């Protein structure tokens, strides 16, 4: 899917999220420009009114694509996507499948986004199971964690593909030249973990960039650039890290405002605290990325602000410009080709 220019189109579910269409529209206005067009998908009248309210008129870099329905948070994702093919999230993914956009972004129903992306974008040939990748901050830079919830369980043969997809994502989207891959386990030594993890280790041993087992505490230490695990464990790790970050920031805020000396000191350290908050804020990383389908699908937090949605759109566009899907297909084709 080589591109003649850097111009990318991203389909954005304007009806997805707790504050839709206000925040998706704000995100589209922040992210769009000469090299990035955004297709806002949803209730055309609501979207146009919100765009005009925020920007005065509809910019040339934004196109409104009408969708007759939306999927509510209480609906079952896969069933709702099949029952509502004209919903905003389904149409956003269908635009990618039809080639009108190179990526789809939604801060709405996670299950619906997973189902719509798999149904309308289809898997990259050779992908056994798509995976959700999230970007996590560490003291050495950014770390890709996958699977973070696409499938609760994983078989040993899934892990080498997770590693390959995570490695290519780290290269193409995060700009890490030679990503190191770690297998999440309960100990660093080979032979630790349950039967699935031990079998996965044997399959990963000779794959590019593999550095062995890593423990949960190693993720934010940046001992590897990619961490692979099953979707149940990955999702628990992600939510635990987000909760820990929230707790630490809350405690720090309380500590520096509790006393007069603390409040005075807070004025001196405020720029550093602001930088720290930006570093650990999930919104700065755009959301979660469904890898393994023929297009990029990005799932934002339901409470994403316009800035968070804009970051998701920008990183989705970056993956499209890097031909991430083409690289997946090429790597899988090389794996399946008979050796000489």
Image (cartoon, rainbow, N blue to C red):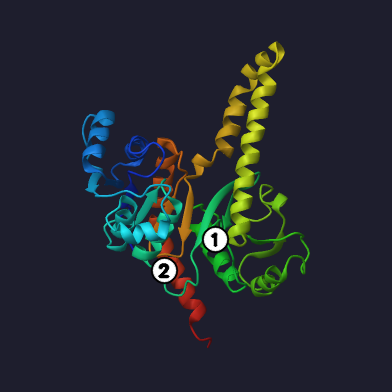
Report the residue that reaches farthest toward the bottom: 340
Residue at image position (66%, 23%) is 254
Q: Secondary structure at mark 2?
A: loop
Residue at image position (33%, 44%) is 15
| Crowdedness near tag 1: few (<14), some (14–19) or many (≥20) residues, C-alpha within 10 Å | many
**Residue 46 tag number:** none
Q: Secondary structure at mark 1?
A: helix
Work out whether residue 220 or residue 132 is closer to the camera in this orientation and state it.
132
Residue at image position (42%, 69%) is 124
Q: Give residue 277's quadrant in the image.
A: top right
- Residue 284 vs 135, above or below: the answer is above
**Residue 123 tag number:** 2
Q: Give residue 21's quadrant in the image.
A: top left
Counting residues from the start of the chain, the first of labels 1 and 2 encountered is 2
Q: Residue 70: horizontal and vertical position, in percent?
A: 32, 48
In the picture of the structure, the residue carrying the numbered disc 1 is 166
- Residue 340 vs 120, above or below: the answer is below
- Residue 87 in view here: yes
Work out whether residue 331 or residue 65 is closer to the camera in this orientation and state it.
65
As measured in the structure, the alpha-carbon distance from the residue carrying label 1 to the one carrying label 2 is 16 Å
Q: Give residue 155's quadrant in the image.
A: bottom right
Q: Residue 267: horizontal and vertical position, in percent?
A: 62, 17
Q: For the N terminus, give its image quadrant.
A: bottom left
Q: Residue 247: horizontal and vertical position, in percent?
A: 65, 34
| Crowdedness near tag 2: few (<14), some (14–19) or many (≥20) residues, C-alpha within 10 Å | some
Left or right: 324 with respect to 97?
right
- Residue 191 vs 321, above or below: the answer is below
Work out whether residue 120 or residue 181 is closer to the camera in this orientation and state it.
120
- Residue 322 in view here: no
Q: Residue 245: horizontal and vertical position, in percent?
A: 63, 38
Find out whether the residues at labels 1 and 2 contact each other: C-beta distance under 8 Å.
no
């Amino acid at each position: 899917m080589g591109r003649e220019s850097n111009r990318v189109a991203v389909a954005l579910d304007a009806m997805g999220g707790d504050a839709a269409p206000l925040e998706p529209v704000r995100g589209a206005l922040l992210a769009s420009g000469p090299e990035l067009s955004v297709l806002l998908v949803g209730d055309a009248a609501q979207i146009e009114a919100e765009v005009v309210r925020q920007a005065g008129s509809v910019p040339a870099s934004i196109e409104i694509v009408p969708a007759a329905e939306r999927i509510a948070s209480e609906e079952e994702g896969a069933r709702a996507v099949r029952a509502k093919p004209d919903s905003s999230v389904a149409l956003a993914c269908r635009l990618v499948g039809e080639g009108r956009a190179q990526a789809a972004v939604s801060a709405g129903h996670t299950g619906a986004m997973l189902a719509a992306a798999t149904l309308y974008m289809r898997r990259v040939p050779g992908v056994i199971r798509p995976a959700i990748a999230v970007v996590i901050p560490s003291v050495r830079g950014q770390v890709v964690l996958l699977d973070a919830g696409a499938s609760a369980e994983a078989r040993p043969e899934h892990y080498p593909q997770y590693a390959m997809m995570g490695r290519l994502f780290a290269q193409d989207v995060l700009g890490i030249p030679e990503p190191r891959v770690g297998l999440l386990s309960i100990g660093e030594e080979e032979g630790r973990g349950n039967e699935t993890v031990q079998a996965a280790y044997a399959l990963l041993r000779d794959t590019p960039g593999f550095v062995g087992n890593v423990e949960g505490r190693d993720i934010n230490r940046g001992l590897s650039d990619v961490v692979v695990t099953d979707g149940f464990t990955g999702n628990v790790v992600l939510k635990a890290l987000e909760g820990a970050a929230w707790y630490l920031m809350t405690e720090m805020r309380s500590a520096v405002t509790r006393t007069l000396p603390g409040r005075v000191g807070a004025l001196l350290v405020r720029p550093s605290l602001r930088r720290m908050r930006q570093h650990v804020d999930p919104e700065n990383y755009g959301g979660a990325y469904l890898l393994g389908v023929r297009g990029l699908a990005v799932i934002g937090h339901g409470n994403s602000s316009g800035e968070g949605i804009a970051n998701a759109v920008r990183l989705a566009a970056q993956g499209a410009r890097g031909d991430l899907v083409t690289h997946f297909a090429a790597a899988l084709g090389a794996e399946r080709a008979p050796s000489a």
